């Protein structure tokens, strides 16, 4: 290889700021004294020991002892030789290089392969963009229009079109001085018996860029009926393109991900476009492969953990089995990451692209906002394999989820999930905890296996998509979290509180039977306790005086804010006369009591199941009587709910 002139090397070193170059890959924050730090890209770490000193142009990791100047960084990070690293930075900073044995950068064929391939891809991307305006590409333009992408949108994302003929791109790049060997090695052309021909033909083309903005490959969608190939085709593994690491959209999303400490994983190229255009600029997609550990590593370095706030990675799946499997797989592979991982599922299975088309951009933003912690998602998905209406089903479900909870490495999270699962299964928390203690610590590496398949009939997830439950307590800063109101159970809890606060005289006698544990949501339970502490519903009839009395009992302003919201939120009934409201309010409270009774009945049935009717006859009979009484009580409540 020809040698780059020393003066040029010095110029590149001078112009490429080490913090800027490293900052493309690693989010850096101040470490004091003009120094910066971040998570080391060369070893796995949780707290930053990777330091950069811009004034000296140097970096060093105190964890793995790697270090050097800006060239050393690029060499090591991109697996390049020294000259290639210089060339990469030169092209990034627009510096023309000169070589000792003559020739300038534009004609020199002896330069590093990686640099040559990057240049070939850049030229190819420009060529494809140009072809999108031609007559043959009308089908491609129609595809974009049908998904509500404008010409400007396509330009912003660099979308192009590859001609149907055999060698349009190959000829074009040859004329630019690229060799057949380079085109084949770069994955742009395929070696045929009569010479190389274009890999992508008659397809819509998305350029895939790396963090520094270099085009490293393409994603290509089929457009023509006579195309025998798969719907999507991607660049194969090349010295430039490593599918386990590339994320489509990362070049555009990088800064936002680092700034907002959030990354959204969507499934396809059009979803990335739709998300960005809908105001979710942190969206990226894997390219023809499942999200894996290498992708996690790329994102983690951008989502530098801060002590106060942890970065979030939100997966959107269309709720199909494959998407669910991907989430479970990510969970299996890197648990340290998992408490920062969320899942957002669209209730009707629409992806962000469809959602934007049918409901508009705000629906895409709402979908992302409706995220659920991954653990909650995994647990629910596992529960879906069981018939929770039967005692056997509940016990089986508990057996299956216990190892998942036991496998949560963050110990502070375990009680939260134990409580949630208890609520979902209608069991008491102690039962769940016992199961976790006894069976929760086996098989923790593969928690979702060994039970029922996680992708079984999935009504629960589908119906309650995006439920945030209370597992949001993952973030300690948000103390009084509201549960997801799409969950019918929480709707009833909220309505009951509204009735007790707004119409205490209507619910008074019924509300007296409500206990703290009738509320599964901790926030709602705390509000209920404020109501009880204020004397209970019906103790004071006057509206504002009553609300004040409840507010005074609330432990803090956070909860008071939720109570105020409940005082003004309209009831979910069309009745506005006294009798109508009274009937509605009593039926809501009866429903709350009924749900509570159902949970208790389940617990008693469970106990009964485990009690030997001969050996422990007295206990068995006692439980049996209790069960009969509770069922009788519940029948009465059901009649009340039905308004009889
Ligand atoms: Zn290191």
Image (spheres, grey):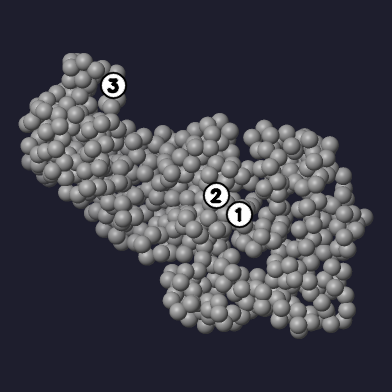
Callout in the foreground (3, 1) = 1
- Asked if residue 129 is positioned above or below residue 225 in the image, the reply reads below
Q: Give whichever of 237, 169 is nearer the camera.
A: 169
Badge 2 is on which residue?
281
Q: CB atoms at circles 2 and 1 under 8 Å apart?
A: yes
Could one spot residue 569 in this view of the protein? yes
Quarter of the figure with the N terminus = bottom right
Q: Which residue is mark 1?
A: 252
The residue at the far right in this view is 194
Work out whether 140 lies above or below 234.
Answer: above
Percent across and percent down for residue 642 are: 23, 19
The residue identified by callout 3 is 573
Place of residue 486 in the rendered image (x, y in percent of width and height, measured from the top left): 36, 34
Residue at the image position 79 percent from the left and 66 percent from the top: 116
Mark 1 crowdedness (10 Å alpha carbons): few <14, some 14-19, many ≥20:
many
Query: Where's residue 26, x and y in %?
Result: 54, 67
From the viewer's perspective, tell me whether residue 491 is left or right of residue 140: left
> Which callout, 3 or 1, points at the residue further toward the start of the chain?
1
């Amino acid at each position: 290889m020809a040698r780059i002139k020393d003066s040029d090397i010095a110029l590149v070193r001078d112009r490429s700021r080490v913090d800027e170059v490293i900052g493309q890959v690693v989010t850096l924050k101040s470490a004091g004294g003009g120094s910066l730090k971040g998570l080391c890209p060369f070893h796995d770490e949780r707290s930053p020991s990777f330091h950069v000193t811009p004034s000296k142009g140097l970096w060093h990791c105190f964890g793995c002892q790697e270090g050097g100047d800006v060239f050393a960084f690029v060499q090591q990070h991109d697996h390049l030789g020294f000259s290639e690293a210089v060339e990469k930075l030169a092209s990034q900073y627009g510096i023309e290089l000169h070589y000792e044995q003559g020739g300038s950068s534009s004609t020199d064929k002896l330069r590093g392969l990686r640099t040559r391939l990057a240049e070939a891809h850049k030229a190819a991307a420009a060529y494809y963009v140009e072809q999108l305006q031609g007559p043959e590409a009308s089908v491609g333009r129609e595809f974009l229009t049908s998904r509500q992408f404008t010409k400007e949108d396509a330009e912003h994302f660099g979308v192009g079109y590859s001609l149907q003929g055999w060698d349009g791109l190959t000829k074009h790049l040859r004329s630019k001085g690229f060799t057949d060997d380079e085109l084949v090695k770069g994955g742009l052309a395929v070696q045929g018996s009569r010479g190389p021909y274009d890999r992508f033909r008659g397809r819509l083309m998305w350029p895939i860029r790396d963090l520094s903005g270099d085009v490293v490959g393409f994603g290509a969608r089929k457009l023509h009926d006579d195309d025998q190939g798969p719907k999507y085709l991607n660049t194969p593994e090349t010295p430039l393109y490593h599918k386990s690491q590339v994320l489509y959209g990362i070049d555009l999303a990088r800064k936002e991900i680092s700034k907002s400490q959030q990354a959204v994983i969507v499934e396809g190229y059009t979803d990335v476009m739709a998300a960005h255009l809908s105001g979710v600029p942190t969206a990226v997609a894997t390219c023809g492969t499942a999200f894996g550990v290498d992708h996690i590593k790329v994102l983690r370095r951008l989502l530098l953990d801060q002590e106060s706030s942890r970065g979030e990675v939100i997966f959107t799946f269309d709720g199909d089995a494959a998407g669910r499997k991907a989430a479970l797989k990510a969970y299996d592979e890197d648990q340290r990451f998992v408490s920062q991982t969320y899942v957002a599922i669209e209730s009707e299975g629409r992806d962000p692209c469809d959602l934007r088309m049918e409901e508009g951009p705000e629906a895409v933003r709402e979908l992302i906002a409706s995220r659920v912690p991954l653990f909650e998602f995994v647990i629910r998905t596992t529960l879906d394999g069981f018939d929770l209406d039967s005692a056997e089903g509940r016990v089986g479900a508990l057996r299956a989820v216990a190892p998942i909870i036991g496998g949560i490495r963050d110990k502070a999270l375990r009680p939260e999930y134990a409580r949630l699962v208890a609520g979902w299964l209608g069991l008491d928390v102690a039962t769940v905890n016992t199961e976790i203690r006894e069976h929760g610590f086996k098989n923790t590496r593969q928690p979702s296996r060994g039970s029922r398949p996680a992708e079984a009939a999935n009504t629960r997830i589908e119906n309650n998509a995006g439920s945030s439950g209370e597992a949001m307590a993952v973030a300690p800063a948000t103390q009084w979290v509201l549960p997801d109101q799409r969950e019918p159970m929480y709707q009833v809890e909220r309505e009951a509180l509204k009735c007790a606060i707004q119409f205490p005289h209507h619910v008074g006698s019924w509300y007296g039977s409500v206990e703290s544990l009738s509320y599964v949501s901790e926030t709602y339970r705390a509000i209920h306790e404020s109501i009880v502490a204020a004397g209970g519903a019906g103790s004071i009839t006057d509206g504002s005086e009553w609300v004040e009395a409840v507010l005074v009992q609330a432990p803090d302003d956070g909860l008071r804010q939720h109570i105020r919201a409940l005082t003004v939120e309209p009831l979910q009934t069309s009745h506005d006369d006294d009798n109508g409201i009274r009937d509605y309010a009593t039926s809501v409270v009866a429903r709350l009591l009924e749900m509570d009774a159902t949970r208790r009945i389940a617990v008693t049935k469970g106990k009964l199941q485990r009690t030997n009717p001969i050996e422990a006859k007295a206990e068995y009979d006692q439980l049996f009587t209790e069960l009969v009484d509770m069922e009788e009580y519940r029948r009465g409540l059901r009649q009340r709910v039905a308004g009889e």
